[in-house]
Amino acid sequence: MVRPGRTDDESLVPRAHDARAGHRFAEAHELFSRADQLGDLSTDDVVAWADAAWWLGLADQALELAELGHQRLLNDGQPVRAAIEAINLGFLLMLRGELAAGSGWMHRGRSLVEHSSDPRARGYVVHLDAEAALEAGDLDRAVLLARRAGEAGRRAADAALTSLALMAEGTARLRAGAVLEAMALLDEAMLPVQAGRVPPEYAGNLYCQMIEICWQLADLRRARRWTAATERWCEQFDSSVMFSGICRMHRAQLRQMAGEWTAAEAEAQVVCHELVGMNTSVVAEGEYLLGDLLRLRGAVADAEASYRRAHALGRDPQPGLALLRAQRGQAVGALTSLRVALAAPREADYRQAPLLRAVVDVALETGDVVAAARAAEELADLAQRWPTDGLRAASLQARGAVELAAGHPVRAMEPLREAIRCWSELDAPYDVARSRILVAEACTTLGDQEAGQLELESAAAALERLGALVDLRRIDLRRPDARPPGGLTRREAEVLALVAEGGTNRQVAERLVISEKTVARHLANVYPKLEVSTRTAAAAWARRNGLEKPPA
């Protein structure tokens, strides 16, 4: 690729460097390519060419050139620069999912730094150690190492190292529950980034870390602000495939929350296409999001395929896959899957919130109010320790659902009404609609049929706009003129609804004024229609599909 020879056009290389400095990466790449065809490139030229290729999303070429640049730097007697190039190579390989190769390059870079007296280079290695401590959950050590890295950055007047260290310390303190102190550190980390004092390759990483933290915390307002800021930052480059793709992923997540499901799906599909070979974890997140959207729209087979692709790329497919199983009538198995997922170690407790929300929903489908209440309490604890609006809204909705299922509709109303208000302020229409359905059930239970119907109509209108077919079917089953689901007759549906309420065959017979033998016969007809084999499974199916007991 890079051959010795005489450069015929001496202006190509200077123009290429000028284009790269001006963030015109396509122009820089084209000029370096032409210069390479005409003659030998220097070590600095190769390193700059690798950088331009990376920004354009030409991952294979970028890695090949970066490896060549690393070797050239060693040959030129520049071990510190060679070490930084090796560490960057390791980072890029890990993003691609090539963990063994990435770890090898990281180790090579560390070894070179250990034989160097350069304090700045040592500071970057200490920062890597802080990140490793974070990943291992050793938060005290992470803070200690991050502070050491930050001191090295300040002594060397290296804004990138200083910001990276502050981000690591802030993340550690956030996971420990020191929210106010943590957010101050994170905001401080972003000051040099926003001032343009941090090189683009590090600035993009810091922007993405900030958005990811906000998203994990369900801090939707901050997530929206930082996503918009990152998009503005990306506009200065003619190409930034990696960072634009990550930004697009977060934009897709926010659009999903805002009810812009079609746009979210389109964005996620672009991410899954553009970042293949560059960032495996973001592609996996895109597949997971597609699975969620397909599940909510009733495309069961396609949703499962997306969840499985996410899993193959290293993303835990829960809670989406468990919710899909529950949707298929396998709620007991789904609840087991969620419990297993909750038992797995996580970087931060607040990352359990989506799983806990799913446990509440699925446990209530199986009739396990105790398990649902326990999950709701854990969710409330998370919302208290990390008080973001998103976690609070989720906690309120879970608490209301549990109170309702436990037979306390009056106590359910306050948290559910507050959940609706919170979700509305966060512009999350799907969650508003789900809370309204619960309020409708509470109103109906209390005898206010008109209020319940109004809530259902509001929820149905929102779900219709979203295309949330699964939830719409459940609402339709609550309408007075609705036909029983699953091919059941009216009488079979009445029997099953009472069984789902916990009635024995004798109690059901007395309620409907029929014989116990007739009840048993109806149940025998119900099982094959629903493709279930037990009374418990049939009852769970009835609750999931909104069957209501007949009027007294």
Image (cartoon, rainbow, N blue to C red):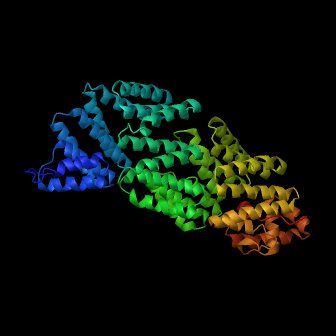
Residue 297, image quadrant: bottom right
Instruction: Give the quadrant of the N terminus.
Output: bottom left
- Residue 465, given in percent of the width and then of the height, sits at 64, 66
Q: Is residue 149 above or below residue 336?
A: above
Q: Is residue 278 left or right of residue 486?
A: left
> Is residue 440 visible in the rendered structure shown here?
yes
Residue 107, image quadrant: top left
> Is residue 342 visible in the rendered structure shown here?
no
Q: In this view, does 483 lie above or below 451?
A: below
Residue nearer the viewer, 498 or 547 = 547
Residue 270, image quadrant: bottom left
Q: Is residue 29 left or right of residue 312?
A: left
Instruction: Give the quadrant of the C terminus.
Output: bottom right
Instruction: Name the residue: 70% across, 47% down.
Output: 371
Q: In this view, does 375 lie to the left or right of 251?
A: right
Instruction: Name the residue: 19% across, 38% down.
Output: 73
- Residue 289, given in percent of the width and then of the height, sits at 53, 57
Instruction: Name the residue: 68% across, 46% down.
Output: 393
